Amino acid sequence: MTYVFTFLILFLFWIILSGMFDSFHLSLGIISCSIVTVMSRDLFFRHKASLRNIKQFIMFARYVPWLLYQILLANIHVAYLVLHPKTLIEPQMIIFKSVLKSDIARVFLANSITLTPGTITLDITDEGEFIVHALSRKTADDLTAGDMEKRIARIFMED
């Protein structure tokens, strides 16, 4: 069952990114997604399909629009910083300890931070400390508030 779910997720992603609906491109998608599914069948689901997997998928589906909204807000904030007549940029390095336990959850958080303009994850230590470069005090404060981390903890059921 995990093969089927993994294939469907990959194939849906293929269709969205390619935007091509002719038989040639769809058959390439089927072949590519089948190969990737066989090679990495536990990419999305480490265990057999269960209610937990469905709940994780729903939490992830709710997280993506929130993340896109945060990216939009951060873009507006960075544009404001750049275009403002006074220099409001206060670059700083922040270090915070994450409550996330699994490596995949930590990487997910690091990628979410880096996707958000104005912040870049520089390192994640073995102890779960994140070293992040923030462009301004506001971006640093937003990050240390922990909202993003809490949402990711819910996805990976670490809350």
Image (cartoon, grey):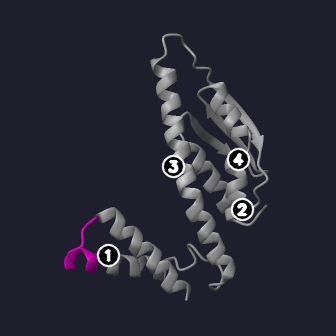
Give the prevailing secondary structure in the magenta stretch.
Answer: helix
Q: Which residues make up the magenta segment?
A: 19-28
Structural crowding at the residue carrying mark 1, measured as other residues with C-alpha within 10 Å and reported as few (<14), some (14–19) or many (≥20): many
Q: Callout 4: helix, strand or loop? A: helix
Work out whether mark 3 precedes mark 1 in sequence or the reverse, and give the earlier one.
1
**Does 8 sit above or below residue 65?**
below
- Read off the residue under disc 2: 154
Amino acid identity at mark 1: Gly
Q: Quadrant of residue 26?
A: bottom left
Mark 1 and mark 4: Cα distance apart in space: 36 Å
Point 64% across, 70% down: residue: 56
Work out whether mark 2 precedes mark 1 in sequence or the reverse, and give the earlier one.
1
Q: Callout 3: helix, strand or loop? A: helix
Q: Callout 2: helix, strand or loop? A: helix
- From the top left corner, tell me how far across and down residue 72 is, in percent: 49, 41
Mark 2 and mark 1: Cα distance apart in space: 32 Å
- Read off the residue under disc 1: 29
Work out whether mark 4 precedes mark 3 in sequence or the reverse, and give the earlier one.
3
| Horizontal relation, residue 146 to residue 53: left or right | right
Amino acid identity at mark 2: Arg
Q: Which mark is residue 68?
A: 3
- From the top left corner, tell me how far across and down residue 67 is, in percent: 56, 50
Mark 4 and mark 2: Cα distance apart in space: 11 Å
